[in-house]
Image (tube, rainbow, N blue to C red):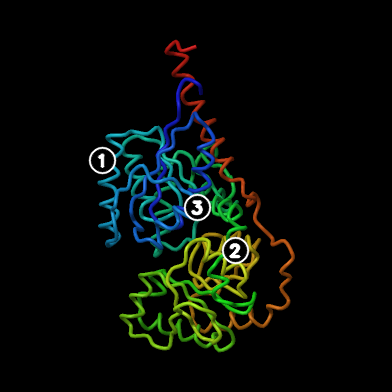
Amino acid sequence: MAHSSLRIMNVVGARPNMMKMAPLMAEMARHPDIESILVHTGQHYDYTMSQVFFEQLRLPVPDYNLEAGSAAQHVQMAEIMRRFGDLVQSNRPHLVLVVGDVNSTLACALVAAQQGIPVAHVEAGLRSFDRTMPEEINRILTDAVSELLFTTEESGNANLTSEGVAAQKIHLVGNLMIDCLAGALGAVRQSQLRAELGLAPRTYAVLTLHRPSNVDDPKKLKATLDAVRALAERLPVLFPVHPRTRSRIAEAGIQGLRTWAGGPIVERAVWMMDPASYLDFLGIVDTAALVMTDSGGIQEETTWLGVPCLTYRNNTERPATVTMGSNQVVGADPQQLLRAACATVENRDARDSTATPRRPPLWDGAAAPRIVRILRETWQLHVQPRETSAGVP
């Protein structure tokens, strides 16, 4: 390794990527034989969805920002591919590392594979088995072109094996999302937002919605928020609203939601809030009575924290959060969500907040060192024969 450094181009594009990349970039920085390059595609580009995460997670300033911006999926992916393709032509890395399942993940993986550059996929092998989800297509295709597949749970290994991926390509390493959370937990519990809201632990719920299947149909969205408003008669519901979801609420003319403008919350209602920063969002999740979500990453975070989570979908690509954690997949029916939420609230006092939550294997905050060790070992095996044959001692 003394004779050649490993040049890795690390890609982020959306908010979940940044949480996973932060501990990995920090670990890479500990090894002088790795030249780590950070590329931000610009898929998420506003402050609350992007820049604040670089600041709070101490991610380095990106070496390249492609500024692809928002557009229809096919347009956005085409623009990312065009810009990333130009970049790798002029600054060719030894490896492209992508994380998660967003458009940037697949777009950059395809470019690298077409250019003959090996791809490493972090969070590989997750499957919802629902191809109506854009993320599922992104996951399947990214795994198909990847040379190194880093999995977060045992289901990922089983899925990849059943798809014919060679065993030597698959590595169960744990969960970078948990590395990030474990490292930030002290700051999370000092969140200024949590203090400003003035809510005691387990006296409120948290809601997130962003998937097209839940927000694009005005009738479905209204029925969902009506069910959440019924829950809010029992306890306040904090609703950090994704920009896309906020637009859909306005277009549908949905009424009856309150807007939080600061200060303690004293009324039972659904309180719409701007998207929270990483630390602030986890601050309110950490002491919630329950979380209702259609997000993948939040299923993982609530599992590690031991907070009851209701996944508002018909499936999950993260089954370990159900079998090992506090997650319950409740389906996509609003009344079913309401029934499950009410039952969870009624049973909240039975939850032992001092007990250590059940967590999947290797969700121990040490995924990043495992990934970097495998990257270095793989590179050493790859480059050593070349150096020997070239007469390098």
Name the residue beneath numbered marker 2. Answer: 190
> Type of residue at label 3?
Leu
Q: Earlier in the sequence, mark 1 or mark 3?
A: 3
Percent position (x, y) of residue 137?
39, 56
Task: From the viewer's perspective, tell me whether residue 257 is left or right of residue 162.
Answer: left
Name the residue beneath numbered marker 3. Answer: 57
Q: CA distance from mark 1 to mark 2?
A: 43 Å
Residue 337 seen in the figure: no
Mark toward the viewer: 1 or 3? 3
Name the residue beneath numbered marker 1. Answer: 86
Residue at 48%, 65% in the rendered image: 295
Mark toward the viewer: 3 or 2? 2
- Badge 2 crowding class, 10 Å Cα cut-off, few under 14, some 14 to 19, many 20 or more, is few
Instruction: Examine the rendered structure and indicate whether residue 61 appears above or below residue 336.
Output: above
User: The residue tagged with tag 2: helix, strand or loop?
Assistant: loop
- Badge 1 crowding class, 10 Å Cα cut-off, few under 14, some 14 to 19, many 20 or more, is few
User: The residue tagged with tag 1: helix, strand or loop?
Assistant: helix
Q: CA distance from mark 3 to mark 2?
A: 15 Å
Task: From the viewer's perspective, tell me whether residue 273 is left or right of residue 67.
Answer: right
Percent position (x, y) of residue 50?
40, 57
> Type of residue at label 1?
Asp
Task: From the viewer's perspective, tell me whether residue 4 is left or right of residue 90.
Answer: right
